[in-house]
Image (tube, rainbow, N blue to C red):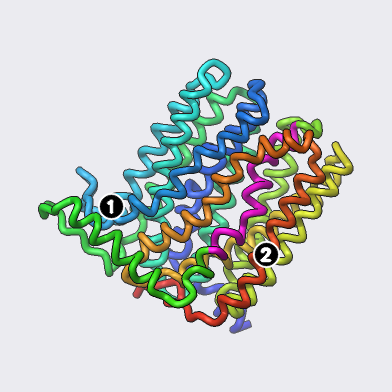
Amino acid sequence: MSRVISAVKPYLDRRVLTMAVLGFPYGMMFFLGVQTLQLWLTEEGISTAEVGFFSFVTLPYIFKVYWAPLINFIPIPLLSFLGARRSWLIFSHLSLIVLLNLIAWSNPSQNLLYVGVLSFSLLIFASIQDIVVDAYRIEILKKDQAGPGIGMLTAGYRLGSFAATFGTLTIADSYSWQMAYTVMSALVSMGIVAALLNPEPEMIRQKVGEKVHFLRQFFENLVPPFQEFFSRPGWIYVVVFILSYRIGDAFINTMVSPFYIQLGFTKAEIADITKFFGVLPTLAGGLIGGALATRINIYTGLLGAGLLHALTHIMFILQAMRGYDPDFLYYVIFLENITGGITTAIFLLYLSREAHPKYIPTQYAFFTSLWSLPTFLAGISGELVELLGHDWPTYFEFCLLISLPSLGLIFVLRRYPLLNAGGLGK
């Protein structure tokens, strides 16, 4: 009984609990800016190739490392009294609310370029949100809270993605896409509430009103983190591993919405099966992964979870071969989501532990930028599907194959030490 209490206790801390609240809007943006939007575009009659190209709007996630240093020395007017991290959290969430409302009242069928620009802008501020949330999480949580904190953040992320998918589809089906995106914009305010519930990390001190030389401060915050990372032995293996560990997911997620529609699934069925039903195994996976992450060797976790999740891609191959089969899709989503939740939680802790304590915002942004690059490259997935003549089984076989090579790199990474326990708070 005492072991159960000690295992549950970290999850009851206010800082750990509010990670779930922060994770909610954190989990909404990719779906509202890309995946759910692709469903809207497909319904508007936009071609598969053009829908696939919308993955290119994820470019800000790749280059966010270059504006990560800004959060360390640029104060936000009217909000700087809250501190560097919390003021940037509130600013980024307010910006996301405005952009979601602009997307809500756009017309994709008549002005696709305008929607693309709005989506691109949305993901710029979503990438800023990513930088601040990740830095804040690592800095505010204690070492023994790192795993539970990631578990709660992942749970919040999954609930946010559930709202941005199932919630959006349900509202769009009953009312309109405009109403759906407007409601989603209101839910983003949860991130502001979370920022106000917690204090500024003790190690962060923003000097309000002090004049700074922009370029000097920028390079002082950008160059040393890269110098430190690229001076490490084995850094190239870290880069290749981060790039390739979730590449199969990137190619699947980019095309999964057109895949469902082309098999004959309705919006309501997609929402019920992949989103409503899928949220529980996803939440369970995130919490299991967060609990496992601090109890087993991180590399053992990466290997076991990564292999298990890659093998679940076979379920998409079988679904493509069976065609329209709602009952079978339940099995696909259950296995894909629970293993995906476990893998994500363990992978996030690994990235946290690779970041040097002195350079968390920039280095963690760099790592997650690398993680995002496959999603950007998956912009060619629509062309690939058309090149294959919409042979979906072959496409998912390709996704499975590209998921496997990174697992071999884990045996190489074991030789090199990690820099922290994933949490630095006091």
- Residue 146 visible in the current orientation: yes
Q: Would you identify the image quadrant in which residue 256 lies? A: top right
Pick the front one: 44 or 287: 44
Question: Does the segment drawn in magenta span residue 74?
Answer: no
Q: Would you identify the image quadrant in which residue 230 lies? A: bottom left
Pick the front one: 418 or 20: 418
Across and down, in percent, residue 175 comes to: 61, 23
Pick the front one: 160 or 4: 160
Label 2 vs label 1, nearer the camera: 2
Q: What residue does disc 1 label?
A: 70
Q: Which one is earlier in the sequence, the residue at label 2 or at label 1? A: 1
Q: Residue at x 70, y 34 (%)?
A: 258
Across and down, in percent, residue 249 comes to: 65, 52
Residue type, label 1: Leu
In the rendered structure, which segment of residues is drawn in magenta?
A: 240-261
For this view, does 244 lie left or right of residue 228? right
Q: Residue at x 58, y 34 (%)?
A: 53
Question: Does the segment drawn in magenta span residue 255?
Answer: yes
Q: Residue at x 67, y 30 (%)?
A: 48
Spatial CA distance of label 2 from label 1 is: 35 Å
Q: How many residues crowd around disc 1 within 10 Å: few (fewer than 14), some, or many (20 or more)?
A: many
Q: How many residues crowd around disc 2 within 10 Å: few (fewer than 14), some, or many (20 or more)?
A: few
Across and down, in percent, residue 126 comes to: 43, 44
Q: What residue does disc 2 label?
A: 405
Q: Report the number of numbered marks.
A: 2
Image quadrant in which the N terminus is located: bottom right
Q: Secondary structure at mark 2?
A: helix
Image quadrant in which the C terminus is located: bottom left
